[in-house]
Amino acid sequence: MTVRDKLMSLPLARQLTVDRRGLGRAAKSKGSESFVPRIRDAEMAQSICPYCAVGCGQRVYHRDGEVIQIEGDPDSPISRGRLCPKGAASEQLVNSPLREHRIKYRRPYATEWEDLSLDEAMDMLADRVIAARENGWEHDMEMDGGRAKLNRTLGFAHLGGATLDNEENYLIKKLFTALGAIQIENQARI
Ligand code: SF4
């Protein structure tokens, strides 16, 4: 290898001589030439970031049924390819080893969480919803010298998480309004 070849193996030398903006040859090396994009050969589905009400467009890359990468969608008129740090990290929502797959419950005055089966948790919720409606239903209230209809309960509320999608939130709103709740919110606020 000549001295010139040795010099030109340095990224800085390549940038100063043949690639002043550092966009091509200066950034390449023997090692980087073998790199391939992680999304090569992956399938892509367009979606929407679930984390807040902005609704940035996402490209969800998947291979063999597994999500492998999530990026901003340049076709989105809302975000034009951009994602904030939360949206850019949403692949971890699917693949993080820290993700909880079991129902966690902490009984009153307990200091530890315990795991519940889905059936047990659903039965507990149903019992409490029924009890709250029976014990705290408000039919009407006095207003302007008459009775105004209420038909509601303040005995339960719903706070959704950002991992709920549009369709789930729509159904939750319908269900809880029909059950008589008036405090129905979602954490997805920026
Ligand atoms: S959390 Fe960030 S990426 Fe997701 S919709 Fe909101 S602003 Fe967009």
Image (cartoon, rainbow, N blue to C red):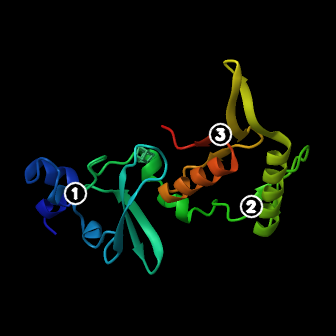
Question: Which circle's residue, 2 or 1, is located before the other in the chain?
Answer: 1
Question: Which circle's residue, 2 or 3, is located before the other in the chain?
Answer: 2
Do labels 2 and 1 touch, CB within 8 Å? no
Question: At numbered mark 2, what does the secondary structure look like: helix, strand or loop?
Answer: strand
- Under mark 3, the amino acid is Ile
Q: Nearer the viewer, mark 2 or mark 3?
A: 3
Estimate the spatial distance between the alpha carbons at disc 1 and disc 3, rounded to whole Å.
Answer: 58 Å
- Under mark 2, the amino acid is Ile
Q: Is residue 105 above or below residue 152?
A: below
Question: At numbered mark 3, what does the secondary structure look like: helix, strand or loop?
Answer: loop
In the displayed structure image, the side of residue 80 where residue 122 appears, left or right: right
Q: Is residue 163 visible?
A: no
Label 3 crowd (10 A; few <14 / some 14-19 / many >=20): some
- Residue at 63 percent of width and 54 percent of height: 175
Horizontal and vertical percent position of residue 25: 15, 60
Question: Which circle's residue, 1 or 3, is located before the other in the chain?
Answer: 1
In the displayed structure image, the side of residue 80 where residue 103 appears, left or right: right
Mark 1 lies on residue: 27
Q: Is mark 1 within 8 Å of ligand 1?
A: no
Mark 3 lies on residue: 182
Q: Nearer the viewer, mark 2 or mark 1?
A: 2
Do labels 1 and 3 touch, CB within 8 Å? no
- Residue at 11 percent of width and 60 percent of height: 4
Horizontal and vertical percent position of residue 165: 50, 56
Horizontal and vertical percent position of residue 41: 32, 78
Label 2 crowd (10 A; few <14 / some 14-19 / many >=20): few
Mark 2 lies on residue: 103
